[in-house]
Amino acid sequence: MLPDRLPITAIPDGLPEWVDNVLLPTLTSGGKGTVWCPEWREHPDAVTRLAAIWDAWTHMLAEEDAMLHSFLRDVLDHHMPMLVDAERGAFRRCNYGHRSAEPLDAVRPGTGGEAATR
């Protein structure tokens, strides 16, 4: 991904098709401790991680000596927990009632995650 496309403010062309046709069909349920939101496009942190995974995938396909094992270990195994883990992943608070994401500086320490009033 080129630096002029960062930070990600719009879903990159091709990402939804890759998620739907390559990533999701290869994944299985992670069990009770995982959460996936079918409306992942509404989660900016998920879009960023999925774009990073997709970027690594496209680079892997372009490399002549690339190994799927390395992609799984170094990319997918790293990012997927940060997406689907029910306690700390991008969808952890998702109940499909999407609202604008609060920036990190809007949360007051010690308030249980309540947004600060500005």
Image (cartoon, helix red, strand yellow):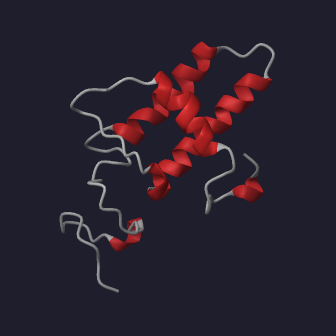
Q: Is residue 106 left or right of residue 65?
A: left
Q: Is residue 97 left or right of residue 62?
A: left
Q: Is residue 78 above or below residue 73?
A: below
Residue drawn 38% across the image and 23% down it: 28
Q: Is residue 17 above or below residue 46?
A: above
The quadrant in which the C terminus is found is: bottom left
The percent position of residue 77, horizontal first and vertical second, equals 47, 26
The quadrant in which the N terminus is found is: top right
Residue drawn 31% across the image and 69% down it: 107
The percent position of residue 113, horizontal first and vertical second, equals 24, 64
How many marks are shown on the rendered structure?
0
The percent position of residue 99, horizontal first and vertical second, equals 36, 67
Residue drawn 76% across the image and 58% down it: 4
Quarter-wise, where is residue 93 in the image? bottom left
The percent position of residue 74, horizontal first and vertical second, equals 55, 25
| Of 25 and 71, the residue lying toward us | 25
Residue drawn 76% across the image and 49% down it: 2
Find the residue positioned furthest to the bottom: 118
